[in-house]
Image (tube, rainbow, N blue to C red):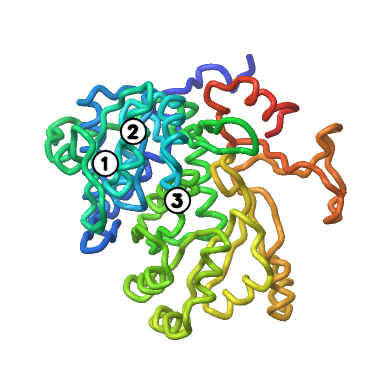
Amino acid sequence: MNIYEQNLPKTAANYAALTPVDFLLRAAEVYPDRLAVVHGKIRRTWLQTYQRAQQLAQALRALGVQKGDTITAMLPNTPEMLECHFGVPVLGAVLNALNTRLDAASLTYMLNHGQAKVVIVDREFSKVMKEAILNANVKPIVIDVDDSEYDGAGERIGTHEYEALLAGASTQSAPLTFQGDEWDAIALNYTSGTTGEPKGVVYHHRGAYMNAVSNILEWDLPSHPVYLWTLPMFHCNGWCFPWAIAARAGVNVCLRRVTPEGVFGAIRDYGVTHYCGAPIVHSMLVNAPDALKQDGMSKLNGGRVKGMVAGAAPSATLIEAMDALGITLTHVYGLTEVYGPCTVCAPQQEWDDLPAAERAVYHARQGVRYHLERDVRVLDPETMKPVPQDGETMGEIMFKGNIAMKGYLKNPQATQEAFAGGWF
C-alpha cells in the first residue's frame, strides 16, 4: 500500500454517488423562483417542480414502490413526464418511458419483460394501454394523467389519478434524496434492434449524469436556456436533456405534438433558444410557409436558435437552409445503448471562412467523442484495430467509457456480445 492509500478513506464528506437527480435539488435551492415549466396555461418554478417531484416520490413510496421496481410511463412531453425523471429515480426505482407510438402487443411484451410495478398513463393512450395491461402477466398499479391541454378521446383506466395522488402525498416527511450507488439502474429503454424481441437497455445513474453534463459542454448550454420539447422524452430519456436543463435551471417548454405552428409559436412567444430532433423535424421547419417562419423568428432581433440533430445524418443542404432561417444545427450521433447522442461534429475555426454551402458539408460529418466518454473509434471487428480514417474503409463504430449502458435486461448473452473486446 502506497502513502496515498493510507488513512485517506472514502467518506460521506468527500465522496457522493453521481446522479442527475441532484440537479433538480440544486435548481430549486439556487433558483427557486425562476420559471421551470411552461405548458399551456401552466407556469411552474423550479421550487414548485422540485416539490411536485418529491410528492410523486412520496406517493409512489406509499404505494409500495421500492428500489429496483420498474415505473412505466406512457406519456407525451408534459410536466408529468418531466417530474417522473426525478421523482422515480430518487427512490432508486427505474423509469421505463414507453414509445407512445407502439401497438398493444409490443407494450404487453415490455410490461412483462420489465416487470412493471406501476404504470403512469396519459388519457390519450388509455385505449392501447388498457389492452396491453389486460393481456399482460403483470398487474401493475395504474395512475391516470388527465392533462389539461388534451381535449381528445380517452378514459381513465387506473385506480389513482396523478394530481390527486400528489395532493395526498405527505409534505411533512423529510425530503427524499438518492441513497444508492451510481451504478444502480436509473432507466430502462427498449430498442427494437434488427431482429427478435425488443431489447431492454438499462442505464445507470453515473451514465445519465455524465451524458447530461456532456450535453451542456458540447452545446455550450448557458444558464437558463429556454428549451422546447420537440424531441420525445421517451426517446433515450430525451437524450438526457430533462436532467441537463435542470442542471442549467432552464425553462422546459412542453409540446404534446410537434407541428410548425407549435414550434414557431413557441419561439415567438417564449423566446426558445434550444431544441432537438431528427432531420425530419428540422425539414418540417424549413418547409413551413414563409409567413409562419417570419412570424416565429421575428422577435429574435438577429439572434439565433440552436438545434441539435441526430437520428439520421442531416444533409448539407438542410444544414445550410436551417442556417439561413436563423437556426444553427449541431450534428450529433449515438444510439439507445449510449444514452442517445455520444459523439458530436465539433466545429473547427478554419470552417468559418468557407462559403456557406461548403461549410455545411463539414457540419454534416461525424464525429468525435463527447467530453465525458472515454473513447469512440471505428474498428475492424475481426482485429479490433482502427481502420484508416479515409472516409471509405468500412468498420464498426465502437464506444468505451462512462456513457454506455449497464447492459441488456435479462439477456446476458447479448450483453456479453455487445461488450466483447472491451468495447460496445
Residue on which the image places disc 1: 53
Q: Mark 3 — residue?
A: 241
Circles 1 and 2, Cβ within 8 Å, touching? The answer is: yes
Seen at 64% across and 18% down, the residue is: 2
Front-lying residue, 200 or 92: 200
Q: Earlier in the sequence, mark 3 or mark 2?
A: 2
Give the structural element (helix, strand or loop) at label 3: helix
State the image quarter where residue 312 is shown: bottom right
Q: Horizontal and vertical percent for residue 85?
A: 36, 41
Residue 355 picture quarter:
bottom right
Q: Amino acid at mark 2?
A: Val
Which residue is denoted by mark 2 in the rendering? 90
Residue at the top extreme of this rendering: 1
Q: Is residue 145 above or below residue 273?
A: above
The type of residue carrying mark 3 is Phe
- Give x and y (percent) for residue 10: 47, 23
